Image (cartoon, rainbow, N blue to C red):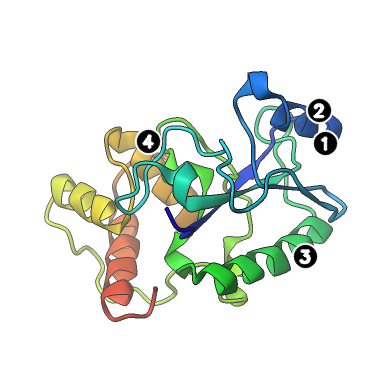
Amino acid sequence: MPISMVVIHYTEMEDKGFAIERLCDPEAKVSAHYLIGEQGEVVRLVPEDKRAWHAGVSYWRGHKDVNSASIGIELDHPGHKYGYREFNDAQFDALVPLVARMVKEYDIPRANVVGHSDVAPARKIDPGELFPWDRLAEYGLCLPRPKKLERGDPFDNDAAFYLALERFGYDITDGHKAVEAFQRRWRPEKINGQIDGEARAILFQLLLDRDRGHTR
C-alpha cells in the first residue's frame, strides 16, 4: 500500500537509549521509522519502504491498517507517565524538515499528518495536548485549528456529531475516547470527552473547509 500518512508519537520513556533499545527489539513487537531526540538528533530505525509496527490497532479516514500506509515518527519524550511537558524546540526544528520531505515526496495530504491518539483514540493519548500542531501547521504540514467558526452549533444531536467525526476520519467505536482525541488535537485547553457547542463548531468548520478544498 502506498504511503499516505505520517503518524507522530512520543516514546513515553525516561531515556532515549531505552527507547531505541525497545524499538529495535523484535520481542517488543513495536517499531518506528524514525526517532528524534530532544536535542534534535534524528535516528532512522526502519527504512521508509518497510512496514514499522508503530500504530498498532488503528484507523484513519477509511484505513484500517495504518501501519501499512504510514511513516511513524517517535519523539523522545517522558510522556504523561514520566512528567508531561512541552516539547523541546530543537526536537521540533528537526521534525519540520523531516515531515516536509515526506509530505512532498509521498504527496501526503495535510489531513493525514496526525497523532497516535488520532488513529487509536481508544488506546493512546500521544503526542498529547502540548504538541505544537499549530506551529507545524504554519509550515503547511498539517491542518491548523480553525480560527473562524462560521456556525455556532451545527449538529442537531450527539449522533450527528459522531457521524461527522467518523466522516472526518476518527474511529468512533468508543465515542467518549473519540471525542477526547478530537479535543486533544483541536481544542487542547479543555479535554473532557463531552460534546459541546465549541467542539461541534470546530468539527463542522473542519469539514466545511475540507469540502471547499482548503484542508486536503
Circle 4 packing at 10 Å, graded few (<14), some (14-19), many (20+), is many
Circle 1 packing at 10 Å, graded few (<14), some (14-19), many (20+), is some
| Badge 1 or badge 4: first in the primary sequence | 1
| Badge 1 or badge 3: first in the primary sequence | 1
Q: Amino acid at mark 3?
A: Asp
Q: Amino acid at mark 1?
A: Lys
Residue 142, x across and y down, in percent: 52, 67
- Using the numbered discs, state the Cα–Cα distance from disc 2 to disc 3 in whole angstroms: 23 Å
Residue name at image x 56 percent, y 35 percent: 53
| Badge 3 or badge 4: first in the primary sequence | 3
Contact (Cβ within 8 Å) of mark 4 with mark 2: no
Q: How many numbered marks appear?
A: 4
Q: Amino acid at mark 2?
A: Phe
Please tell me which residue lies in front, 93 or 131: 93
Query: Which residue reaches farthest left?
Result: 156
As drawn, is 42 to the left or to the right of 10?
A: right
- Using the numbered discs, state the Cα–Cα distance from disc 3 to disc 4 in whole angstroms: 30 Å
Residue bearing mark 1: 16
Instruction: Give the number of the mark in front: 4 or 2.
Output: 2
Query: Can you tell which mark lies on residue 39?
Result: none
Query: Which residue reaches farthest top?
Result: 27
Query: Can you tell which mark lies on residue 177?
Result: 4
Assign a secondary structure to mark 3: helix
Residue name at image x 57 percent, y 74 percent: 104
Residue bearing mark 3: 93
Query: Can you tell which mark lies on residue 18?
Result: 2
Residue 168, x across and y down, in percent: 30, 58
Circle 3 packing at 10 Å, graded few (<14), some (14-19), many (20+), is few
Assign a secondary structure to mark 1: helix
- Image height of 126 relative to 24, above or below: below
